[in-house]
Amino acid sequence: MEKRYKLAGVLLSASLVMAACGGADEEPDSSEVDEVVEENEEFASTEDSTEESPEESTDESTEEPSDQPTDGSSDTIAPGDLNHDAGEAVDAASGNFDGELVEVELDNEDNQWVYKVDMESESEEYETVLSVDDLSVVDEQTESDDDFDTEEHFNYGDAIPAEEAVQTAMDETNGELEGWTLDKDDGQIQYDVEIKNGDNGDVDVTINAENGEIVETDD
C-alpha cells in the first residue's frame, strides 16, 4: 500500500509541475489522479499475486503421490473374481473346434487373466486363449498334427471342478492363486495348482482330479 501512494505522489508532483509550466490557472484534474491511483492498485495487486504464485506451485509439487497402482495388474487372483468357470471355457473352445481335450490352464498372460484350452483331432492341433471376463477369443492357433495320442485325452466332466481343486490347494498352503493346469499324466487326470505363499514363496500343489485328494506339495 505504501508503494502505491509513493508512486501516486510522484505522479501528482509531476502533474503539478506540468501545470505550473503551462500556466498558473491550471490545476491537476482530480479524476486523472484517481485514475493513476487505481492503475497502481491494479499493478500492485498483480505484483502481489505473482510473488505468491511460487508458494502455490511449491505446495502442489510437494503433494504425496497416489498409492493406487497404475495398471491394476496382479500376479494372483481370487477365485471369486473369475466371471466364468473352467467348464464354460472348455465348452466355448469345443464350439470352435471339433476335437479331444488335452489340457486346460488358467494363466496371467500379458497382464490379462485367461483360460488356455488345448485340443486335437486326428489331423489338427488347436489352442485357444479366452478372456476370463467374457470368454472372448484373445488368440487361437490351428496346426497340422500327426501325433494323435489318445492317452493324453480326457473329458473335463471326469474331473472335479477347477474351483474345488483351487480351494483345496489354498486351504492347504494358506496362500493366493497364481494359476493352474489340468492335464492327464500316466493315465491320471491331475491339477497342478500354483500358489503364492508369503512365508514359503511359490508352492505347487498336485491334486488328483478324479477324487480331489492332494498327491504332492512342492515348495
Image: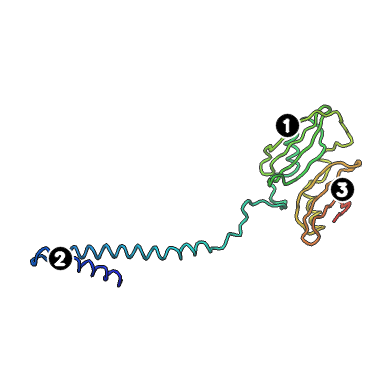
Q: Is residue 115 above or below residue 68?
A: above
Percent coordinates x, y for residue 29 in the rendering: 15, 64
Relative to 12, 25 lies left or right: left
Residue 17 position, x and y percent, is 16, 67
Give the quarter of the figure containing the N terminus. Answer: bottom left
* Residue in the picture at 30% in, 72% down: 2
Q: CA distance from mark 3 to mark 1?
A: 28 Å
- Count of numbered badges drawn on the protein: 3
Residue at 82%, 37% in the rendered image? 102
Quadrant assignment, res 43: bottom left
Occupied quadrant, residue 89? top right
Q: Which residue is mark 3?
A: 208
Q: Which residue is mark 2?
A: 28
Where is residue 50 drawn, in percent x and y? Answer: 39, 62
Residue assigned mark 1: 96
Which residue is found at the position 85% from the left and 28% from the top? Answer: 146
Rounded to the nearest whole Å, what is the CA distance between mark 3 and mark 2? Answer: 105 Å
Q: Nearer the viewer, residue 211 or 63?
A: 63
* Disc 3 and disc 1 in contact, CB within 8 angstroms: no
Kindly indicate the quadrant of the structure image that contains residue 123: top right
Sequence order check, earlier mark of 3 and 2? 2
Query: What secondary structure is marked by label 2?
Result: loop
Q: Position of residue 27 (x, y in %)?
A: 12, 66
Q: Amino acid at mark 2?
A: Pro
Q: Nearer the viewer, mark 1 or mark 2?
A: 2
* Residue 100 versus residue 197 in the image, above or below: above
